[in-house]
């Protein structure tokens, strides 16, 4: 008899529907659970990478600022002291082989002194305006870029603007300075950090993937997002390595520059003693005294070359052959008795 079977069929269908619904509900729950787990892990991993990036950014920027301040101090003090003292001496001519094997024409000396004086005046103007006047990347720009480039085509009154302008236009300096700069707004463009093409999106759009009725689809999207974020983390790690390399090179330049400054200041004192004891006529100096004057000139040449050497290129990359330059300058300095 067929009638009694109807309730059983209905009951079976109802149970099957319930089982299917239960399975879907369980799958949905598992999808949400897995999606959340991936999201939490990604947020933690990205957060650690981002913190390391920020730490490296600040450290590199601070190193540039420290070096920039040293360069300005050398121009405003040591170089100024050299120029003021050296200009007192009359009839300077580095021709005697006992002093030097290379001939230095009087016109070369005059042009050299004029070039230094221009930078000295501009550095003095920056200091006169106060260190806070070159905030927003100015000091970092001075540390990263050679003095000639930093002050290029800048009159005394625009020396500060020149430094700030470099910081705004140089992608790496803008990034190191902490974002968009009022002088150009090039620190952040379209929400993308310029260093290494890193797309730093703080929210990462992870949260929007967790809650949805279509959990299976969102889980698939989360796996795609996982690949994107891991790629960004790799970029961040590469950027950190680049910044650490820039920082190490800048520290080496700083140490070498500081060592040269100490030796230079000592030689300037000796030059002052020569003038005090023997007057200002170079022709009346002994060979020993002439050699002291020549050593001052050569150290000034070395110092000028160091101050004019850029650590970053116009594209914001570490300048090539810097390590070779540092070794070469150290050898030159060593000949004057620096250790």
Image: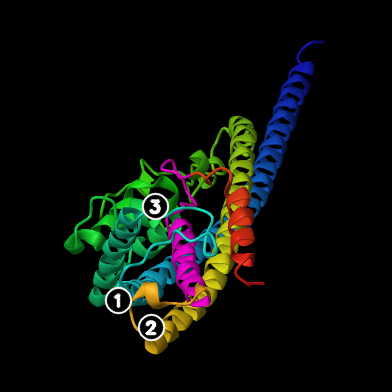
- Which residue is more in the foreground, 195 or 290? 290
Q: Is residue 55 visible?
A: no
Q: Is residue 105 visible?
A: yes
Crowd class of label 3 (few under 14; some 14 to 19; many from 20; radius 10 Å): many
SS class, disc 3: helix
Q: How many marks?
A: 3
Label 1–label 2 contact, CB within 8 A: yes
Q: Residue furthest bottom?
A: 277
- Which residue is more in the foreground, 70 or 259? 259
Mark 3 vs mark 2: which is more N-terminal?
Answer: 3
Residue that numbered label 2 is attached to: 275
Crowd class of label 2 (few under 14; some 14 to 19; many from 20; radius 10 Å): some
> Would residue 157 appear left or right of 188 to someone viewing this image?
left
> Which mark is in front, 3 or 1?
1
Residues under labels 3 and 2: Cα distance?
Answer: 47 Å
Residue that numbered label 3 is attached to: 174
Residue that numbered label 1 is attached to: 88
Query: Eyeballing the image, is 307 above or below 30?
Result: below
- Main SS of the magenta part reads helix
Query: Eyeballing the image, is 91 above or below 190?
Result: below
x and y percentages locating residue 277 in the rendered image: 41, 89
x and y percentages locating residue 177 in the rendered image: 41, 59
Residue 23, image quadrant: top right
Residue beneath the point at 58% across and 41% down: 232
Let me know if residue 303 is in the magenta part: yes
Residue 109, image quadrant: bottom left
Residue 3, image quadrant: top right
Residue beneath the point at 38% across and 83% down: 275
SS class, disc 2: helix
Mark 1 vs mark 2: which is more N-terminal?
Answer: 1
Q: Which residues are magenta?
A: 288-316
Mark 3 vs mark 1: which is more N-terminal?
Answer: 1
């Amino acid at each position: 008899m067929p009638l009694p079977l109807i309730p059983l069929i209905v009951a079976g269908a109802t149970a099957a529907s319930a089982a299917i619904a239960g399975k879907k509900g369980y799958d949905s729950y598992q999808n949400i659970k897995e999606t959340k787990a991936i999201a939490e892990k990604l947020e933690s991993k990205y957060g650690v990478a981002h913190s390391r990036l920020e730490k490296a950014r600040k450290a590199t920027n601070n190193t540039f600022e420290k070096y920039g301040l040293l360069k300005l101090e050398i121009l405003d003090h040591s170089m100024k002291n050299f120029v003021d003292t050296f200009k007192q001496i009359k009839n300077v001519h580095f021709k005697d082989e006992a002093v030097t094997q290379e001939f230095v024409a009087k016109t070369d000396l005059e042009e050299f002194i004029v070039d230094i004086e221009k930078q000295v005046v501009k550095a003095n103007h920056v200091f006169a305006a106060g260190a806070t006047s070159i905030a927003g990347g100015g000091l970092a720009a001075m540390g990263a870029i050679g003095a000639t480039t930093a002050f290029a085509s800048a009159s005394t009154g625009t020396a500060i603007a020149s430094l700030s302008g470099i910081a705004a236009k140089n992608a790496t300096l803008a990034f190191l300075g902490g974002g968009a700069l009022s002088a150009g707004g090039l620190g952040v463009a379209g929400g993308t950090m310029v260093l290494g093409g890193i797309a730093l999106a703080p929210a990462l759009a992870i949260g929007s993937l967790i809650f949805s009725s279509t959990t299976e689809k969102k889980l698939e999207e989360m796996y795609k997002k996982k690949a994107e974020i891991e790629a960004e983390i790799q970029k961040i790690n590469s950027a950190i390595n680049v910044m650490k390399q820039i920082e190490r090179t800048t520290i080496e330049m700083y140490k070498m520059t500081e060592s040269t400054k100490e030796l230079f200041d000592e030689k300037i004192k000796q030059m002052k003693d020569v003038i005090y004891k023997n007057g200002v006529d170079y022709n009346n100096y002994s060979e020993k005294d002439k050699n002291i004057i020549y050593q001052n000139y050569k150290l000034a040449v070395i110092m000028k070359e160091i101050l004019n050497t850029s650590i970053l290129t116009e594209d914001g990359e570490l300048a090539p052959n810097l390590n070779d330059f540092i070794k070469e300058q150290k050898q030159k300095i060593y000949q004057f008795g620096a250790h």
